[in-house]
Image: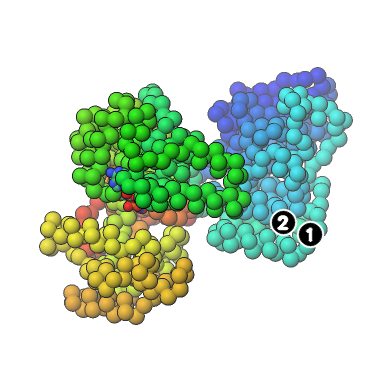
């Protein structure tokens, strides 16, 4: 029809093929092509029915998100669906690969749906800050009922063909060739139209519907798109079909240009782009099947678990058999918990554990292809380890360090083959957290970098490139953030106020709750070690030191910024801490003043954005979008807020002067030691079209 949609026929059945590689995204060209094809089916008396099918590895995997930030060109998806419903001949959607979002809505607009085994169907719109806008919230409840529709739409879950058939989302799982199956299915309809709009939403127990709504709201953090989705499904039961469709469309159009939808699309594109690295594009990764993990502590055990789950053979190495035992215990506990909870079969747990070898003998590493060290955070220990290991492992092995703060080049320089050294910075718990900072040192060879990314992907992680600089991307920004929060303590805020403000913004946890959870003593030791190097002019908050001196090291000692009278429960604000903070303010002559939650959040976000600008200026990262991915995937930044750079770019678009003025104020109050970045750099580095023109 137009290069994106092809038209041919199988006898009296039209075959409309969608061809928009790589995932047949539903773009304007695809919509126009389908519309014209349907008109042709309607007009041609020789054709009795039609099938819609995807070329390549999938049906329409989703709408073309690039169109969503601007006015949508016609024909829009509801126009195409209206044409299918208005066509006097039945149209069968033949699904394979994925039929998601607009792709599945198109299928819902057809007279029947058949799918190849393994096809994924679903309406993941809420995960992009919107709701289905082409009838999904109206047609799906007519097929599966309100309770299931609320769950499916509000979670955005993808459902595999067999389950989709059981739920009623599709009519049949295809046997044999999909095209032939769909053509035969269409022929069997004998011209009968079966539009879903003619069905009623079946009666369901009101209490069950209410329970589904409540659960969905809770799980969806009461986000606007979740509330709108629930409302739209409710409308399906009480309003005439076309009226309800119009209401759904109105909500979709409103959400589509809202800030959260921009933010979530920004995250989507950022993720897609993070893997496209020109520096390793045509460089093959080294083969890795056998991995050594050195150190079976918190991180080593997690890295070993992630590697086993990804199918690697893992050799876990420890210094002492006691430490090895503890690590193995941790790993064993993980499998026991997973199987007990029904999340993993005993067979699978057995298979994974069978790939694990544990040892205290470095000689066991003779045939590994990748070494990941997660030993103590001590330069001399890591240097000595790599120097020794290098004599045992093959020359081509990749030597990865999980260091958080050490200089990767100094580790590399201790080896004879520094080009083999790379940083793979996992986040705790390493088998759960998606973020993986891949650190390129001065010596790292391109194929070693390519290997780091390939392994990261196989581990199911989101690998992000970073330069070798203190704290890399994430910990560097986090440190600046925590420091500003400590400044706010001295200036008048309390830990619980700061934590509550950032948690209300959407962070998983506030900085002081995090500090108590991870323990205050590690940072205390680092500060003590750095005392000599610190500029005496630098603003220094002594509150955490004083807490440590009182043996308030966090949860593990029952007290930190909060007190923890009950194990496992949230901490309680403690008057002792409030008094201590007030004393510190007084000692510095600071007159305490109240902070609103908005002031707290703005200062936090501006600090993060400032640090992002510095990271760009210093070349630690060349991609602003990577900063947002790091903060969302490693530090609990709310995804629907897009990340600190996205936030700053929105603010710069609407009111740059006050943002600059607020940053100036932060610089003044922070004093010596604070480096002010150039915020305009963020705007220049943000890809086109990511940020709403005016704050939504
Ligand atoms: P940990 O103290 O829990 O574990 C370290 C383990 O290494 C210990 O079991 C120790 O016995 C073992 N070890 C020490 N020297 C060894 C050697 N020469 N050979 C074999 N084993 C040896 O520490 P951790 O929290 O797992 O941290 C490990 C590394 O990961 C550090 O570099 C740390 O900075 C980094 N890291 C930690 C986190 C975190 O949240 N804990 C996050 C990211 C990175």
Q: For mark 2, does the 10 Å Cα neighbourhood hold few (<14), some (14 to 19), or many (20 or more) residues?
A: some
609 left or right of 307 in image: left
Marks 2/1: CA distance? 8 Å
- Above/below status of 551 relative to 252: below
Say if 69 sits above or below 12 in the image.
below
Q: Residues within 10 Å of mark 1 (few under 14, many from 20)?
A: few
Q: Position of residue 317 (x, y in %)?
A: 36, 41
Q: Going from the N terminus, do you reach mark 2 or mark 1 first?
A: 2
Q: Which residue is mark 1?
A: 204
Residue at the location (36% across, 33% down)? 364
Tell me which residue sits at (44%, 30%) in the image: 289
Return the residue nearer the eye: 667 or 425: 425
Q: Label for residue 631? A: none
Some atom of ligand 1 lies within 8 Å of the CB belonging to the residue at label 2: no
Q: In this rendering, is residue 687 above or below 44?
A: below
Viewed as shown, does residue 334 lie left or right of 478? right
Contact flag, marks 2 and 1 (Cβ < 8 Å)? yes
Return the x and y of residue 9 as percentages of the image width and height.
Answer: 75, 20
Question: Which residue position holds label 2?
Answer: 147
Residue 178 lies in what quarter of the image?
top right
Secondary-structure class at tag 1: loop
């Amino acid at each position: 029809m137009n290069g994106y949609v092809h038209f041919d026929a199988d006898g009296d059945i039209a075959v409309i093929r969608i061809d928009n590689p790589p995932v047949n995204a539903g773009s304007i060209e695809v919509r126009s092509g389908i519309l014209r094809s349907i008109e042709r089916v309607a007009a041609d008396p020789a054709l009795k029915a039609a099938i819609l099918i995807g070329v390549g590895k999938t049906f329409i995997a989703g709408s073309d998100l690039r169109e969503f930030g601007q006015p949508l060109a016609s024909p829009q998806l509801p126009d195409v669906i209206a044409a299918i419903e208005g066509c006097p001949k039945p149209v069968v959607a033949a699904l394979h690969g994925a039929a998601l979002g607009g792709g599945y809505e198109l299928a819902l607009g057809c007279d029947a749906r058949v799918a190849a085994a393994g096809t994924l169907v679903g309406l993941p719109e809420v995960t992009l800050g919107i709701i289905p806008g082409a009838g999904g919230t109206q047609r799906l409840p007519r097929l599966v009922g309100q309770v299931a529709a609320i769950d499916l739409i509000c979670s955005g879950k993808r459902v595999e063909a067999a389950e989709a058939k059981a739920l009623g989302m599709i009519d049949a799982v295809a046997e044999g060739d999909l095209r032939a199956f769909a053509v035969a299915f269409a022929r069997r309809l004998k011209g009968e139209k079966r539009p879903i709009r003619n069905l009623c939403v079946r009666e369901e127990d009101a209490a069950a519907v209410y329970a589904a709504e409540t659960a969905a709201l809770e799980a969806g953090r009461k986000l606007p798109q979740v509330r709108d989705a629930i409302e739209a499904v409710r409308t399906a039961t009480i309003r005439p079909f076309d009226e309800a469709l119009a209401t759904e469309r109105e909500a979709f159009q409103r959400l589509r240009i809202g800030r959260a939808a921009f933010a979530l699309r920004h995250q989507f594109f950022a993720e897609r782009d993070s893997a496209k690295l020109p520096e390793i594009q045509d460089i093959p990764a080294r083969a890795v099947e056998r991995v050594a993990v050195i150190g079976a502590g918190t991180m080593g055990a997690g890295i070993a678990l992630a590697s086993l789950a990804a199918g690697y053979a893992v050799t876990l190495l420890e210094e002492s058999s006691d430490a090895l035992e503890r690590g193995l215990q941790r790993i064993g506990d993980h499998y026991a918990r997973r199987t007990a909870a029904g999340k993993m079969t005993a067979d699978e747990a057995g298979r994974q554990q069978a790939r694990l070898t544990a040892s205290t003998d470095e000689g066991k590493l003779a045939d590994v292809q990748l070494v990941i060290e997660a030993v103590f955070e001590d330069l001399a220990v890591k240097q000595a380890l790599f120097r020794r290991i290098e004599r045992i492992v093959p020359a081509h092995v990749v030597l990865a360090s999980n260091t958080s703060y050490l200089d990767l080049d100094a580790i590399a320089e201790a080896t004879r083959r520094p080009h083999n050294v790379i940083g793979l910075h996992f986040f705790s718990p390493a088998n759960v957290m998606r973020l993986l900072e891949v650190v390129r040192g001065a010596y790292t060879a391109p194929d070693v970098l390519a290997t780091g990314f390939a392994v990261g992907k196989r581990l199911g992680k989101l690998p992000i490139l970073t330069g070798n600089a203190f704290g890399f991307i994430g910990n560097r920004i986090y440190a600046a953030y925590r420091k500003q929060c400590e400044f706010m303590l001295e200036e008048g805020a309390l830990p619980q106020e700061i934590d509550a403000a950032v948690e209300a913004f959407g962070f998983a946890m506030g900085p002081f709750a995090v500090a108590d959870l991870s323990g205050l003593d590690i940072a205390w030791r680092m500060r003590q070690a750095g005392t000599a190097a610190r500029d005496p002019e630098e603003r220094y908050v002594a509150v955490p030191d004083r807490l440590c001196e009182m043996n308030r090291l966090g949860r593990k000692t029952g007290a930190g910024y909060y007190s923890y009278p009950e194990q496992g429960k949230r901490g309680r604000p403690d008057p002792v801490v409030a008094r201590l903070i007030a004393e510190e303010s007084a000692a510095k002559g600071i007159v305490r003043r109240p902070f609103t939650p908005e002031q707290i959040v703005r200062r936090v976000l501006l600090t993060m954005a400032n640090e992002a600008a510095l990271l760009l200026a210093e070349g630690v990262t060349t991609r602003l979008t990577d900063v947002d991915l790091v903060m969302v995937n490693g530090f609990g930044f709310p995804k629907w807020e897009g990340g600190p750079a996205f936030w700053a770019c929105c603010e710069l678009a609407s009111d740059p002067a006050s943002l600059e003025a607020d940053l100036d104020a932060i610089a003044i109050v922070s004093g010596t030691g604070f480096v002010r970045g150039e915020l305009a750099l963020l705007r220049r580095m943000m890809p086109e079209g990511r940020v709403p023109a005016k704050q939504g």
